Image: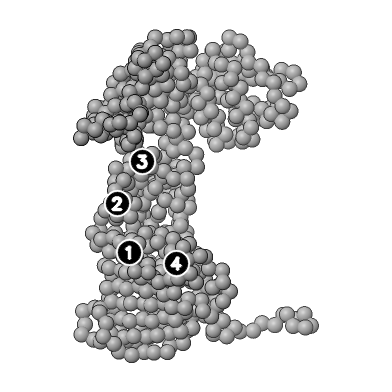
Amino acid sequence: MNADGHCIIRLLDADTVNQIAAGEVVERPASVVKELVENSIDAGATRVIIDLTSDRRGIGRIRVVDNGSGMAREDARMAFVPHATSKIRHIADLSKSMTLGFRGEALASIAAVSEVSLATAERGTDRTGTEIIVKAGSMTRSEEIGTPPGTTVTVKDLFFNTPARKKFQKPVSSEIAFITRQVESFAIAHPEIAFRFVHNGSVRLSTEEEGDLFGVLVSLYGAGIATELIPVEACEGPVKIFGYITKPSFSRQNSSGILISINRRQVLARPVADAVRSGYGTLLPDKRYPLAFLELSIDPALIDVNVHPAKRFVRLSRERDICSLVTQAVVRVLRGANLVPEAPLDHTLHAGSKKSPLPYNQSGRPACEVHEPAHTEYILTDRRLRQTALVPGLMEAQENQPDIEFLGQYNGIYILARGAEGDLLLIDQHAAHERVLYDQLSATRGMSDESQELLVPVILTVTPAEYQFIRVAIPLLTGKGFVIEEFGRDSYAVRAVPAALGSTARYEAVRDVILEFSSNRRCTGPDAEEMLTRSMACHGAVKAGTVMTPDQCRRLLDQLSRTASPWTCPHGRPVMVSLSRDRLDQMFLRR
């Protein structure tokens, strides 16, 4: 606007245009590393070295060295011209390109806000190499030099001419963390390339040129991950999936460990990451996520990689179908895997330790023995056993059905059993029963559940807010088998409950199910029904401290082995852990 309020349109000068374009691609030092390494990969490199120097003021120098195809002198000069590229020639090529980026676009953007030195020599020729130096978009040197085949790019004084961008850079430690994660992503997406990341002379990350994703993951995450990885493979139409996911016991509090590559490009694909998590279902607690390293090969025509200047995001034209295939692949491999976590080794169990390796109760007898019931809170009545047996999902043997032989009960909380390989299994009886009830209730989802009239109605006295929430929730509660009526001003009478809870359902269980559900204020839709089903299974399951007969324990184990996911309760807590003979021998110093 001028002084008169008129809008004046002007062309920006070339320097301003270049700096704006650079700002879209080069956000931070990690962006520079990403663009340069992608160039190296596109050039066919089998070895890439990322070498950084820094001090308390920030990243001083970024150097990326590769043994790729290199460039001739004229190509090297053209690489710094905006919009020059070796990757495409026409607009139609964008939908078919399998490369990671456009070399000229990256170098021109980086050189607009720093000083860039490029040394390159063509592989397989006798020509001398070329050195080019560009600062703030202007070429200051171009000459022939002797240099090994491949390309070395050195970036210094990043953002020297854009002080606002430099001012808001993260601390050095944060930048190094971003760069480390970026290099990890490249190593996982390209296991056939050897990566080496050096910071101030110290090697922070190194992988071998093996082409083995499993080996790369062990190198990056340590030997402990080796037994936690489950291979995933699937193919349907134009989509192929390959990679690894971790067992439910190896999880994190966020989804940052779900790394997705699409056509060898690491991308942020939230729908695909959500599809991976969905495949775990109730094997994981809420807000827990697995580690996953998946490569999706997809017809380039189904992908738009140009929705973000730095190409971090992609758009999938058949996103629902692709995500469904990912979820199905995860479900399939988890069903075929042994997901029993092994109990961690307690290093305090050694000679001279004050800890006793055998649990004893106050009478001095070993606590690990079978007791007859001391009260009438049995795990399942005959009626509930018959109802459970009628559920088809609990009658069919699963492909990962655990082979469990009952040994005893410990403290009215855990069932001791022998696994198929002779391992000692410790089974949480509440979590096991919760899984059985959940599968029973889930098998009838969408249908009206059978009700069981209570011997004594449960009267709930609630607050005015709870009264209104329950009122809204009554249709779904009725559909799940509750018979609930208004009973005075601030009360409800529960006269019947789902058959899974039984005719002798405790007051606390009925109250907790209804109040826990209604307090979430999500009283309609599939999510609400799922939440109610989990709550019913939890509060209807046998409690810790309930002593069971051997026959009751065996019935529970038999029913558990026929559930879809016997490894965890519906909330993702482990149902069982194992102690192998080797682990026991270590605990008792026998080896």
Instruction: Return the residue at label 3.
Output: 247
Residue at image coords 42%, 40% = 280
Tell me the residue at 21%/82% (across/down). 125
Using a 10 Å C-alpha cutoff, classify the residue at mark 1 as few (fewer than 14 neighbours), some (14 to 19) or many (20 or more): few
In the rendered view, tell whether residue 172 sits above or below residue 563: below
Q: Who comes first in sequence, dot 4 or dot 1?
A: 4
Task: Name the secondary structure under disc 1.
Answer: strand
**SS under mark 3:** loop
The residue drawn where x is 41% and y is 59% is 181
Amino acid beneath label 3: Lys
Mark 4: secondary structure: helix
Quadrant that contains the N terminus? bottom right
User: Residue at position x 32%, y 26% from top?
Assistant: 357
**CA neighbours of label 2 inside 10 A, class few (<14), some (14 to 19), many (20+):** some
Residue at numbered disc 2 = 218
Foreground mark, 2 or 3, reads: 2
The answer to whether residue 546 shows anywhere in this view is yes
4 or 2: tag closer to the N-terminus = 4
State the separation of the CA atoms marked 4 and 2. 24 Å
